[in-house]
Image (cartoon, rainbow, N blue to C red):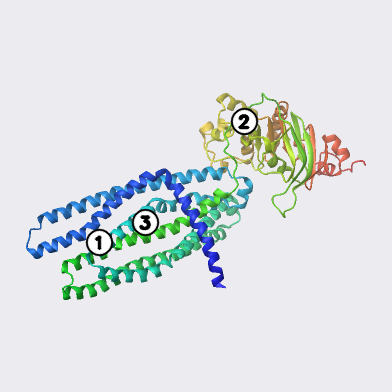
Amino acid sequence: MNAASAPETTGAESPRVRETLTALYGYVRPHRWTVVLGLLLALVGSAGGLLQPLATKALVDRLSSGGTLATILLALTVLVLLSTVAEAFGAYVLERTAESVVLAARRSLIGRLLRLRLTAVDRMQPGDLMSRVTSDTTLLRAVSTQAVVNAATGALTLVAAVVVMAFLDAVLLGVTLVVVAVVGAGAALLMPKIGQAAERAQAAVGEMSTGLERVFGAFRTVKASGAEERETARVDASARRAWRHGVRGAKWEALLGTADNLAVELAFLAVLAVGGARVASGDIPVSTLIAFLLYLFYLMEPVYKLVEAASAYQEGAAAISRIKEVDRLDAEPPATYTPVGTEAGPASVRFEDVSFRYGPGLPYVHQRVDFEVPGAGMTAFVGPSGAGKSTVFSLIERFYETTGGRILVDGRDIRQWPLSELRSVIGYVEQDAPVLAGTLRENLVFSAPGATDDDIRAVLARTRLDTLVDRLPHGLDTLVGHRGSKLSGGERQRVAIARALLRKPRLLLLDEATSQLDAVNELALRDVIAETARETTVLVVAHRLSTVTDADRIVVMDAGTVRAIGTHEELVAEDELYAQLAATQLLVPAERPAG
């Protein structure tokens, strides 16, 4: 069984190695000449070290012949200084380039993450996605430049050292290579284990970030429920998994480093024994043995560089694998804000036989939904929870694609609209009315960055936010806290509505936009919405029928279908479900409609 599975593993690893190397080259390519400069400087530093044993041999020979040492000592000093300066400058160049690689990777990844389709985000955890931008990209620092240069300089200096050692004494070289090959074969078996441990550690870090994001997303609920200890234990479990895999990786790396030292030390003992015998027999002078032993210790550096490069590659490959997963997720094309305004007139909307479900095998949220909304006026969507009302808005915005049928805006299939153009005509207020960390001004102009101060003042007055601004210590430039924590629920809803109105949309989507408002502000906002509906197409999802009784048309939805369309009076008389909803909310007497 094991024999049969081995080729499959090899076949699976080969494409992954190619993908990793291709991705790595893509990160390094813009900085290739800087990396080449760092490589050349590293080689100059290594060359200085490579020449030192030969200079030592010359020094010993000069001592044996009774010659002066000043010239050789001066040359050795200059050699050490030059190699040290070259290595130091090369290290700076490479570190700076590594930071540039990480920056480029983060910018690319952030741009990709913010363009992901909701279907892709729904499958991932936000905390895990964030960890790919932070901890995973950090691992690129070592593998993108230092590992590349270490591998190149290590290989070149190792070859050069072996050539010089062969020139000094082929027999001693043979002894050295036999010992190194035996130990190196064992060390090679440790490489995949380092990569596996690194990948699992990074995955655990992603789980930890997800756990923290989960807690901070419902911080008040966590505290009110007395769940701090339970949530701490949950995040702590992920942290322990990351620690466990990190320690496992450290164990393999320590064994790898030990194997490196062991190879050199065993080779030293073997060369000392064989070399001592050859000196005693007169086959080689003592200076040759000294130089060869110095080269043997010199071999530690290029071998260590190769081991370090291999270890960094394993860790970097794990990070690149997780980063490339994001690249494979479905993303939307780049979008830019394009102010449209209402000059083109209100937009019309039509659903034609629309079906939708979130994935194969899942139940349908919409089943053959049909309705038409002409330009201007207010259309309300009502029905029990889970009827598919909010999904109407998600499909219009193309957060999700329909499973069947089509949606038309201005008589044009929304799949034929450029996405940024479609969304530029829409103002959207979500059910939970999110407010972003930052100032009140930044939140208001979030959907309309080109809005003027006059535009802002006008929309503040319309949404009754002007009194709030007057109370705030720094007016519009007051920080609203994480997710608008310094604002009340009703204030957050009014900010969200003001933000949408400031966009001057042709189509306004309001999903439970007044659910947290008091009666006075709700009545005022109803007037604002009614006024807006005279020049804009307004679609409203509402559970409180009091907010939509004056709508031009009401679409009653139930179990993903449209069961009735009409005005409040028509539906009370003709549709049993709507009449029950109205009676429950004390809008009509509790009587069954005729028919």
Residue 304 in the figure: left or right of residue 282: right
Does the residue at mark 2 contact the one at mark 3 (Cβ under 8 Å)? no
Q: Is residue 5 above or below residue 344?
A: below
- Residue hosting label 1: 164
- Residue hosting label 3: 151
Identified by mark 2, the residue type is: Arg
Residue at 68% across, 42% down:
394
Nearer to me, 297 or 273: 273
Nearer to me, 447 or 454: 447
Residue 519 in the figure: left or right of residue 191: right
Q: Locate the C terminus by quadrant.
A: top right
Measured from the top left, where is residue 37 in percent x and y? 33, 46
Tell me the element at label 1: helix
The answer to which of marks 2 and 1 sits earlier in the sequence is: 1
Measured from the top left, where is residue 61 in percent x and y? 12, 63
Identified by mark 3, the residue type is: Ala
Q: Locate the N terminus by quadrant.
A: bottom right
Tell me the element at label 3: helix
Q: Of circles 2 and 3, which is in front?
A: 3
- Residue hosting label 2: 503
Does the residue at mark 1 contact the one at mark 3 (Cβ under 8 Å)? no
Quadrant housing residue 186? bottom left
Residue 8 in the figure: left or right of residue 430: left
